[in-house]
Structures are given as C-alpha cells and as structure tokens.
Amino acid sequence: MPTSSSSAIGQVVPSISVRGVSKVYQKGGMHHDTLRGLVAGLFRSIGTPRAVRREAHWALRNVTFRVMPGEVVGIVGDNGAGKSTLLKVLSRITSPTSGEVILRGRVGSLLEVGTGFHPELTGRENIFMNGAILGMTRSEIEARFEDIVHFSGVSNYLDTPVKWYSSGMYVRLAFAIAANVDVETLIVDEVLAVGDAAFRQKCIKRMNSVAEDGRTVLFVSHSLGLVQSLCTRVLVLEAGSVVFDGPTANGIQWYLERMQELTYSDMKSDGQSSEVGDSDIGYEGIEIDGPSVGGEGVLIAGRSVTFRVRFRVGNQSVPGARFLLSVYSEYGVAMLNCDTQFADSEPLKLEHSGVALCSLERLPLAPGRYRIAVAIHARGHAVVHIPKAAMVVVGTSEFFASGLSPDPSAGVIMVEHDWRFEA
Amino acid sequence: MVIVRPASRWTLISPSELWQFRELGIMLAQREISVRYRQSILGVLWVIIQPAVTVLVFSLLFNRLLGVPSAAGVPYPVHSYSGLILWGFFAGSVGRSAQVLVANRGLLTKVYFPRVFIPLSVILASLVDLIAAGVVFGVLLVATQTVPSGNLLLIPVSLLMAVSCSIGMALLVSAMNVRYRDVQQAVPFILQLMMYCSPIIYPIEKIPEQWHWLYSMNPMVLPIQLFRSAVLGTPIDVPFVNGVAIAFTLLVLGLWYFHATERRFADIV
C-alpha cells in the first residue's frame, strides 16, 4: 500500500504563497536626498511629535493568497491599488515591511521589457546580458539563441548597438528574450501593451503556451479584455488589500460593479465643482439610461443609450446655447463628440431649467471604460466644462450579430460594414 | 525555494546566492569592460596613456623642477609609477562606484539579483585595467634597467589588501550615494586628498616618523608600500597590523552597510 508516497505526490505545492504581506512607505521626513536634508530633518524632528513626523502610506495591507502551478492569475485594480508594489515584492525588488512570500521554482519577472539593455551593446550582446538578468545561464541562452532571434525578427541587426534600433525592434527583441526564458513562474506587468498588433498576438499565444506547459503566470494589466482572455483566476486589489479572489468572469464583473459604485460616488462630490464661472446657466448632473448588463450602469454596445444632462437656467433666458458631450477612452483619447450644432445648426434659446437628452441608437464603443465630458456654451462662449462628468463601463457587445467585438488594440469604435467577394 | 521576508540587518553577504547568480555577475563585469571604451578612438590605449602621462608630468614637475626625491636608489618615474599602479586601481574602482547604482536605476527597480554585483563589476573591470597597467610597469622597469629586487611574494599580499580596501570603500560609497547624492560630489575630492596623503609623489621618508601612525590611517598607504617593497626592495616603514586592521574594517563596514541598505535601494534610488 503506497499510501505515504501517493499522498506526497498527490499534494500539490503552491508556486507562490503570500502570507500577510504589508508594505509601508514613509511619506515625508524620510527621504533626504542630501546630507543637508538629513541634518535639517533631524532638527525639525526634535520639535514635532513622532506621529506627525512620519506619515505612513500602506501600499499593501495584509495580502494573503496562494497560486498553484499551471494557474494564470490576473491582477486588476485601479492605479495606486498596489498592483505594482505587489509585483515588486514578489520579484524581490523591494522587501515587504511584514509578512512573507514563499516562491518555489525559478521566477522570471517582466516588469518592463528590455531591462538591462545597454544602448552601447549590440543586439547579440544584449541577448546574453538580458538573458542572464532573467536568470538564464550562458549555455541555456546559447541553446535558445536561434529561437530568440527568430521570434524577434531582428536577425539582420544582431551586430548593431541597440541604441540605433527603432523602438519597435527594441521591444520585439526584449520580449523575444523574455518569452524564451525557462522559468516555472512568470510575472508579467503590462508588457503586452507595446508593439504592433501582430506582435502582440504572438506574445499572447506565447503566454498561453507557457500556461499550458503547467507553468504559473501572474499577469497585471489594465486591459480587462486581455485578463479575460488569458486568466483563469482574478485578484482584485483596492487600496492595498485583496478585495476579490476567484474565477475570472466573476472577478471582472465584481470589479466593473465596484468601479461604477466608486465613480458615481466620486461624481457626486466633484461634479459641480468644476463649473466655470457663475452665469445664468449651470450644470446639475448627468444620468445615463439604457439596457445594462450585470451591475448598474454597465452598458451594452449595440444597444441604445441616452445621456441625460440636467441643467439649470436662471431668471433670464439664455440665447446662443449649445451642448457638447464627448466620450474619451480611459487613456484620455477622444472617441466620440456629440454636439447640438451637428444635429441642428439653429442656435438654441433656453427659457428654463431642464434636461438635455442625447440619444445614441446603437452604442458603437467596444467593451471597456470610458469617460464622459460635458460642455455647455451660452452666447457663443463656453460657460460650463465638466471634464469628468461620468465614467461608463461597456460590459459586453451586441453590436455585431456574432457578438464579437474588436480587440481594443485594433479599434474601439464599431461601425456597420459589409464584406463582399468578387472573382 | 525562496523565502522573502522583511530585511534583516545583521548579515553581511550570502555566498550561495552570489554563486547562484554568478553568470550575471560575470556578464555585468564584461559589460562594464566592453562599454567603457566603446566609441572612443584610442579605446583600450587609455589604460596606458593615463598613468604614462601622469608619471611624465610628475617626473618633470615634482622631481626635476621641485626636487622631490624618490625612494632610496629607485629612479623617480619607477618610484611614482609603482605607487600609481595600485592607487589607480583604488581610485578608479571607488570613483566609478559612486554613481554606478544610480546609473543602473533601471536594473534596481525592475529586476532582482544580488545588488552587490553592480559595484563588484566596476572593481572587476578596474582589475583588468590594473593588469594592463602592470604590463606597462614591466616595460618601464626594462626601459630604466631596474632589476626587481624585493620579496616578490608580497605582491599578492599588497594586491589582496588593495582589493579589500577597494571593495569596502566602493560598497560604502555606492550605497550611500543612493540616498545622499552629496557622495558623488565628495568622492573625487576625497580621492584627491587621499592621493596627496599617500607615498606616490614623494617617498614615505619625507613623513616624520612620529606621524606614521596617523599617515597609515589612509588605507592605501600600506598596500602601496608593500607593492613597492615587493618589486624594488624598499623598506615598508608603516605598521603592518594597522594597515591590515584598517583594510579588514573597511571591507566589513562596506559589506554591512551595503547589505543593510540594499533592500531599500529600489524604493529610494
């Protein structure tokens, strides 16, 4: 009866085990860039009570989770939620303030492609340098050399210093090295956000195959679409704590709903304040109506949506009024612009307070997060400008009959189109 | 299996980890060496030009014009070069180390490896320069028909001490500069003062005997005297124990300070 040995084999050991990890940064009074600063700081600190002197920022707060071999785990969260700090602790770049991390097997971290590339060294030399940084031995790099060169597609420039490379070549070579590292656990931060679409596809394929080989991948990204297509499990970080840990679909849903909650409460506090001047017309707020999926206000592409801009008019009527509503991507790129002048060139004259309704029959935005900005003009001048009137999340798409939507790297706005074939 | 815990302050260095990352250490040193003279017309010749021109100027100015003597029975150029050889190694290592961690910020904040390899790579590269300078010294001995007459076994001892002082000082200076950028301003100046306070331009006999204890606080005095004695048979003239104690203290202090601060480099660099 091989009981003892079978239990030893049957017991799978986690690749990453994080127990109660916290990381505190001291704000102010701590980083003296010059000795003079240190001396001045010492004198200042004599007079101030200790609590005031050191303001602590908890980048991570009691984070605990385990990752099993073969899992592909996505980490999502807003900027400043602690994603980067977590990766830095896991990659041993910075040490935790408390708690411990146990890593089994070789860990390769890709917090940025091309780390350790030296501009004066040639592509060939940098392959060896970067490979060594990622933990490969010289003989391993030699064995992989052809693959790396082939993957990168820069074979003609191997003996050129990388400072003469185009940024595309540079990134391709860097990723090719990283993709060919033999590690049990791969930690990736947003590296896929670079390069052209074709190369990106190549990278995603490569990451999938890494996972299929039973290796562990920890993936941090702003792109929920990528997380959805790559990961089996999702951790949501908020203010340094893990607030969700579970299957990808649930995790993303949870995150989107949470985003909605936060942006709405955000809006109530700062919506009015960015009004320009005091005039006879004012902005009161915005509501978004339309079929939604999952959480409150998660819109569906291809279905109708109505933006209801509430405004207030004072005692006098307002001539020459004009409403503008713009949609920006979460990276700040302008996507759509709806203007009362487009629909009707006659100047508006507003007599009393009300609601301006802007309806889109079929929302043409691919799933993702968007920011809505509102501007109101009166007498030919902009009197109200609300750059962050609302954040909207498009959850799924019914724009095309297939239910598919473009990868955000390829396009965000969907238009109806036909394909025909001629002999 | 790797366990990541809050930094402990009371260890000096982990040999097993250095061994594990040895290939990276070698690559960093290779990079340091191969990058140093890229895109320069004279290239590696700089290794020879610098000490050669320095000795020429010293000989003309100090020896011929100001009448500074050399150590007994040694031609002045041989005297000053025999001092410059180890001094150049020390000053090169320490001088370049001051900014090396800051210059490699990208590496520090993006990837883990024993950080000590960065200043060590500078020292390894300086060792290569030292070998080249040693060859020039041989040529100088032949040219001036100087026959080596000392206890050649002292050469490795002097080298070991110079390396130990360089490592200690380089670790200290590089780690301090991550936090206090004053260090990179102060280092060239301190190195210059230290050179004046070492028997390179003048022989040690010029320093009154009762001040030798203070003079030998300069960690490079004993290695220079040992090397000169090994090759030229001149007397050592400084207390051996003091020098060894200083070199050892410097090494331990450097390792300790570097290790105590390295876990926070990525946060403050």
Image: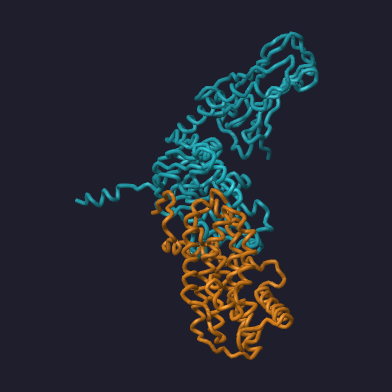
Q: Is residue B185 left or right of residue B247?
A: right
- Farthest residue, direction front: B210
Q: Quadrant of the C terminus of chain A?
A: top right
Against B193, is A398 above or below? above
Residue at 51%, 44% in the rendered image: A85
In the rendered view, would you say A83 is above or below B3? above
Asked if residue A324 shows in the view, the reply is no
Q: Quadrant of residue A115?
A: bottom right
Q: Residue A261 placed where, x, y %?
A: 52, 25
Per the rendering, the colour in which chain A appears is cyan
User: In which quadrant of the rendered view does residue B225 lie?
Assistant: bottom right
Count up the numbered dots.
0
- Residue at 70%, 17% in the rendered image: A282
The x and y percentages for residue B94 are: 58, 65
Q: Write the residue at 70% across / 68% down.
A: B40
Counting from the top left corner in percent of width and height, residue B14 is at 43, 61
- Residue closer to the observer: B54 or A344: B54
* Above/below status of A32 relative to A362: below
**In this picture, residue B197 sits left or right of residue A51:** right
Provide the letter of the chain coloured orange: B
Relative image position of residue A105 (x, y in whole percent)? 41, 54
Residue A73 located left or right of residue B235: left
Res B248 seen here: yes
Q: How is the image coloured?
A: by chain
Closer to the camera in the image, A266 or B83: B83
